[in-house]
Amino acid sequence: MRRASALLVLIVFAIGAVKWYVPWLTMPRTVVTSTPSLDGMSYRAEVKVPARKTACIRPLPLDPGVRQIRMLLDVTGAQAPVVELTLRGAGYESHGRFANYPLSAATIVLAQLSRPPDRAEDGELCLHNTSHRAIGLVGTSEPESLTVPVTYVAGKPAGEIDPAITFLTGEQRSVLQRAGTVLDRAAAFTGVVPGWLMWPLALLFFAGLPLAVAAALLLAGRRS
Amino acid sequence: MAALTVARVRGTPIALALLLAVAAIHGTAWAIVMAPWNGPDEVAHFAYAEHLAETGHGPQRNGGTGSQSTAENSALFPLNLYPIRLQPGAKPNYSELPRTKIGRAGELPDSARKDGSGPNSAANYPPLYYTYEAVAYRISPWRSELGRLFTMRLFTVALFVLTVGLTWCIAGELLAAGWARALATALVALQPKLASGAGMVNPDLMLVALATGELLAAVRIVRRGPTARAVIALAACSAGGVLTHPRGYFLVPFAVIALGVAAWSFRERRVWTLAAGAVAGAAMVLAVAGAMAWVGAHTGTGGAGAGTGSPSIAGFNMRQFLSYVWQFYLPKLTFMNTKVGPPYGYRQVYIESFFGNFASFSVNYRLVYYDALQVGAALGIVGLYTTVVARWRTVIANWPVVVLSVTFFVGLMGLLHLVSYLSLRTGPDPVITGRYLLPAVALYGVAAAWVCASLPRRIGLPLAGVLLGAAILLAVGGVGLSAERFYA
């Protein structure tokens, strides 16, 4: 009976892992490289960019993985204004545009960059409003959510409002496909654990926990 | 002494050693996958310990030169670790890490670590846990802010392992079957919220360890009779709890009740128990005075209200309080007014935030899993009730332990409900959350194991296997969710 009970620990875990973990691990997801400026949790605020004016946001963490930029725009009227984007770093410049998007108070817009950054460095994103109407770059002014980048409109600081920005790779990949990246990042942010050690640690965690618990149940049972 | 230690280690049952290893692995996994400073209030708790380690002084709640040190801020903001805490979709700035000054050798002057003198929202906490973490900070072989934080997190993991060991001892006192003892201990080692708390800098885990230690001492005192060693342990845990956390105050009346039950049960030792109790009481009073003095000196309140960190009790309305407690657990009755505060009760505290709501509430299981946990908890409560009824003779025969267990849990919850009610009368914050129940986590494990052990063996043992399989699924799943949230 003790042995069956210990085996049951492993069977329940295995069945649950197949039923819940496998779909979760293999489900394709949008790959985010960074969220240098955030949307609001409780309330939103926006930076107005007047007609024919340019807003620049800096410093932003550029990364060779960045292929797309996602933001939130507040636009009214009949037609979606075209917003020209320029992402630049030292010796690097790339372009994209927000166009043909639905209009609302917080429309999610996505732009493809002409080329990814050459290397990881701090850079700047400029958005030029090509239309005759003002547009709003939606984000937040919540103190808890404010980030390092500062927004300048026509060269002047726009105040304590951060427009939401997400850098994407443009790929859809599963957690399993990105396991190496996940483990490397987790290790790096401990400031201590070397990346190579993460694989044995992950194995110890995933396989060692059920085996140790089952063995404990088995061995403690012997003492009863 | 060394020989004694070696003998003790050798004498450790293999099952216990395995479960301690499970706790160590589980807690360390959380320390790795939770982004730095993303535990609840971890920014403030780290800042407190860092300031104590660097200057020998605690930070101020209402004054000072900065909530965090320049060194902590140098990592917090460029790496985006501060703003993402409450936003589930937000990520750290991974590519910034090599370029960020996180306090590696020569990057920042020594003064950059000394200027986090406040205002610090944790400054109204007593200093014991922060002293413990200040030692970790000082002896950390890794000198960057991230490296020191990780070392401090591992020190909290050690408190988790200690809690699991103490649970094993409590279960050994109360459960006859060895497998039931392992089940109780394993449920605590696999409790996902407890392990996530171990993977961060937060005094909750020290309070949990001390509360579990006090529970063990109390159980031994009422079962075996009061001894000098057990009374010292009881008083030390109680005083330690008071010096660790404002919520630790419930341990003082619990210790008094434990000694009272012992004095009643062991009449031949009544005089000795009362004398020992008086000495223990003096130690606890000293601890309370010390905690209040410390808090007063760092909040500018002179210690007023330091006991629970609670708002004023003025205007307390018993009828309204009872109505609030009733509606926390059960539907409102027709003669009751709607309870104060938001719709927040049993499900949110006993299920969602006891098992989930990781990091700063930004990592969660899917709602359907909370539904399953709620159903499981309901079945567990029915099972416990049925076991009590079916084994009432055993319950009556062990009344001192029953009184202690009920007193411990009701005392903890009574304090939490009182603080929550008083807070809700003046604002929207219910204060109470699932991790505040963790000081009673050993009772959760032992109760589940007692129900299983009371069933026929052919049912109880397989049920234990199923429970543990499900507990591992939750544990591994929680760590995976956190890794994905922060690093995918």
Image (cartoon, coloured by chain):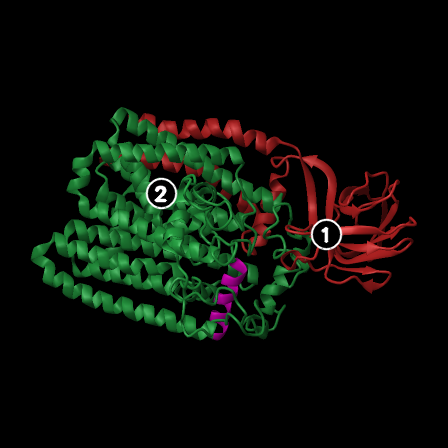
Chain colours: A red, B green
Kindly report the secondary structure that dominates the magenta region of the rendered protein.
Answer: helix
Quadrant of image for the N terminus of chain B: bottom left
Q: Is residue B378 left or right of residue B95?
A: left
Q: Residue at x 63, y 55 (%)?
A: B83
Of the residues shown, which amino acid type is indicated by label 1?
Gly
Q: Secondary structure at mark 1?
A: strand
Q: Is residue B250 above or below residue B123?
A: above
Q: Which residues are magenta?
A: B42-55
Q: Is residue B111 left or right of residue B346?
A: right
Image location (x, y in percent) of residue B373: 44, 35
Image location (x, y in percent) of residue B299: 47, 72
- Look at mark 1 in the image and give the residue it sits on: A139
Could one spot residue A91 in this view of the protein? no
Badge 2: how crowded within 10 Å, few (<14), some, or many (20+)? many
- Look at mark 2 in the image and give the residue it sits on: B19
Residue B20 part of the magenta-drawn span: no
Image location (x, y in percent) of residue B486: 60, 47
